[in-house]
Amino acid sequence: MDGKTKLELQKTACKIRMGIIHGVHAAKSGHPGGSLSVADILTYLYFKEMNIDPADPKNPNRDRFVLSKGHAAPALYATLAERGYFDKQELFSLRHIGSFLQGHPDMKNTPGVDMSTGSLGQGISAAVGMALSAKHFGDSYRVFAALGDGEIEEGQVWEAAMFAANKKLNNLIVFVDLNGLQIDGTIEEVNSARPVDKKFEAFGWNTAEIDGNDFEQIEKALAAAKASDKPFAIIANTIKGKGVSFMENSVGWHGKAPDDEQYAQAIAELETALAAL
Amino acid sequence: MADIKTVATRVGYGEALVELGKLRDDFIVMDADLAAATQTGKFKAAFPERFYDCGIAEQNMLGIAAGIAATGKKVIVSSFAMFAAGRAFEQIRNSVCYPKLPVIIGATHAGISVGEDGATHQCLEDIALMRSLPNMTIINPADAVEAKKAVFAAIEHNGPAYMRFGRYAVPVIFGDDYDFKIGKANVLREGGDVAIIATGLMVDEALKAYDILKGEGISARVINMATIKPLDTEAVIAAARDTGAIVTAEEHSVIGGLGSAVCETLSEACPVPVLKLGVYDRFGYSGPAGKLLDEFGLRAANIAEKAKAAIALKK
């Protein structure tokens, strides 16, 4: 990856993080921690990787993305807005009555959302279904999904993993956003799914383990995924709350909104970071 | 007495899949390791490359179906009613019904007439569960002919559909010229003293009840309510207005099924006595299907008794 590309992605990710904070603050609720951790992955997918056209969000040949960890909706919305699917001002309507930016993704009403998700463990199955559909009907699009590390405690995830490998769905690439924290504590304290890579490998997948907040590593992992003859899981070690100092690695910021003072501080930090790029 | 042809509705379902498969190749059929029993095995044998077995993972199967439908393709998934509507309930709610994806669920082995497998497999709650979901259409065919026609209608339907089929061979009621429409009840017998609204295998029992009642000088209207949601409220209200007494008959719990749907309609639009025949808040048990239908009171004689009781309640 050349320096210019990396810089542009970093700037974009910074703006997306601001969009997350704007949205969650305006909503007075939502999930900033897991949105900030997955923001770089979404940035890379929507600005570098996926074959998509914001002007034609329902194009049947587009690449698909399923946010299986649907509570990171603020990150998806901020990414879609930054990419031009809808006006960035809409982010301030997050979770409000009448907004198409629902608390969890709604494919029927939000431009660019490929699957309604939010109930954990279900999005991965839908992504598998999309990948199967592409293979069956001879379509060339690829399917991407993002799972949470708490989410993979759901049994359905492993039903989907088993099936995807059995049907050799190598058009499916899944990120596991391994930020190490879930609502009730660290994933080790609650019910750890570690080692995540070994589990996916045991289910018949190829894997790569990376720093999921590093664009060069994301790019490298996706290159390996594209050459895979099996479905591919990218175990992305990330920092929950990444980019906002007081939210980083803090369980408490899984599912609450910043107050006005915290909001101002978070935006100031991100603006400083953006200016430094 | 002439021999009565009996065929399970699941057989009509399996045959319909094969016939559909010959006509079009734009849909996928899936099962969860029950293809022989659900009858999707017939489709699998005819079109192996268009059939996918999910293994014993119904929740994943419904999610996969949602994903396929989200790509604009048609998909039909099968399992027993217990595991489709029961185990995968939340997947049907959140992945299928909320985004209104056109997934067809072919749920077989519904009701007490599963027989020997017993309570764990005798699903008596699926209509209640599916009826509570926005965007869901529920079809419960009375015989194999209706089952077949309902499959052809469902594949053209632009939304989720739950189709309920039985394991037990039941009399064939309809001829091949029968015209099935989603959401449309059929009046099979005319009568003015009471109306029997039946669904599934209880439709044949209702026709027999008509004869019993006729012998006692009572004139009953018999309505086949194959589509339970959206309910043909026009037919229900007309039956209440014309007869003033209603009996519902279903091989399902009396909580949340056809009887409840009819009561919900009539309590608001045309309150008349409604007596519900079904399974009364209990689990089933093992035994031959026919014997179980006797023991659970799901027979023509039971319908006739309810009809007389409903008439007695008229003001």
Image: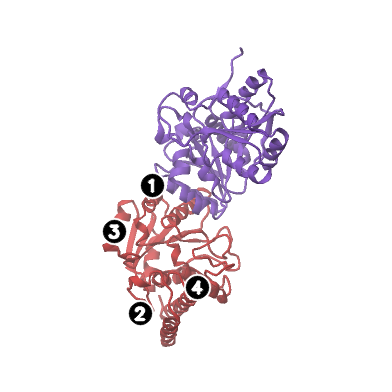
Chain colours: A red, B purple
Which residue is the site of mark 4? A27
Nearer the observer, disc 1 or disc 2? 2
Which residue is the site of mark 3? A191
- Does residue B173 lie above or below B230 as drawn? above
Give SS at disc 3.
loop
Q: CA distance from mark 2 to mark 4?
A: 19 Å
Task: Name which of mark 3 and mark 4 comes first in the sequence.
Answer: 4
Task: Name which of mark 1 and mark 4 comes first in the sequence.
Answer: 4
Task: Name which of mark 2 and mark 4 comes first in the sequence.
Answer: 4
Q: Which amino acid, mark 1?
A: Asn
Position of the C terminus of chain A by quadrant:
bottom left
Residue A166 — which label? 1
- Decide which of B308, A217 is in the foreground and name it: B308
> Which residue appears farthest toward the top when viewing the image?
B1
Q: Which amino acid, mark 2?
A: Phe
Q: CA distance from mark 3 to mark 2?
A: 25 Å
Mark 3, Cα crowd under 10 Å, few <14 / some 14-19 / many 20+, is: few
Count of marks, rendered view: 4
Give SS at disc 4.
helix
Q: Which amino acid, mark 4?
A: Ala
Position of the N terminus of chain A by quadrant:
bottom left
Q: CA distance from mark 1 to mark 2?
A: 43 Å
Which residue is the site of mark 2? A246
Across and down, in percent, residue B161 comes to 57, 44
Q: Chain of mark 3?
A: A
- Decide which of B231, B300 is in the foreground and name it: B300
- Residue at 44 percent across and 53 percent down: it is A125
